Amino acid sequence: MKRDDFIWTIGYQDGTALVDGPSRKRHRNRSAGELLDAGQYRAAFCAALYDGELEDFLPRFQTATGIAVDSGEALQRLFGVFEPPRKGQAVSVIG
């Protein structure tokens, strides 16, 4: 799955990722930090997870939101996102 598709996935239906097309287009190729600064917390987390930058992202997230989380695993539970699918994943862009 492509990075921007993963970041903007809003759910799944029958194994197909449903992607928020307008948000993906508006925020294409932004870093986790840029998304965090824009108030797109879940998308910022997904970008950091996809890029393997959770350790660097965690303190910035805590500062930006005031939410006391102590690990990347806590963020994964908070947002309900655990791993990006790396192999072929069907994607349906909506909106």
Image (cartoon, rainbow, N blue to C red):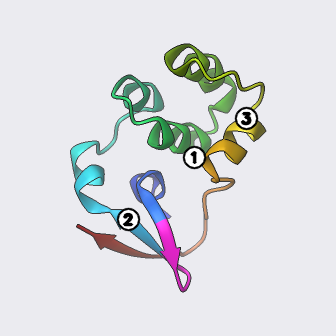
Residue pictured at 67% horizontal, 55% vertical: 83
Mark 3–mark 2 distance (CA, rounded to whole Å): 23 Å
Q: Position of residue 16 (x, y in %)?
A: 49, 79
Give the residues drawn in magenta, as a range. 11-16
Q: Residue at x 45, y 43 (%)?
A: 43
Q: Residue furthest top?
A: 63
Q: Is residue 82 above or below residue 87?
A: above
Q: Which of the labelled discs sits on residue 50, or is there none?
A: 1
Kind of residue at badge 2: Val
Look at the magenta stretch and give its main secondary structure: strand
Question: Where does the C terminus fall, quadrant-wise?
Answer: bottom left
Residue at 61% x, 63% y is 86
State the image coordinates of residue 63 (x, y, percent, origin top left): 56, 13
| Mark 1, other Cα within 10 Å: few <14 / some 14–19 / many ≥20 | many
Asked whether 15 falls inside the magenta stretch, the response is yes
Name the mark nearer the viewer: 1 or 2: 2
In the picture, measured across the screen, residue 84 lies left or right of residue 37, that is right
The crowding category of the residue bearing disc 3, from other C-alpha atoms within 10 Å (few below 14, some 14 to 19, many at least 20), is: some
For mark 1, give the secondary structure.
helix
> SS at mark 3?
helix
Amino acid type assigned to the residue bearing label 1 in the image: Tyr
Where on the picture, by quarter, is residue 57?
Answer: top right
Which residue has dot 2 on it?
Answer: 19
Q: Which percent across, then down, holds residue 26? A: 22, 45
- Circle 3 is placed at which residue position? 72
Is residue 56 depicted above or below 91 in this figure?
above
- SS at mark 2? strand
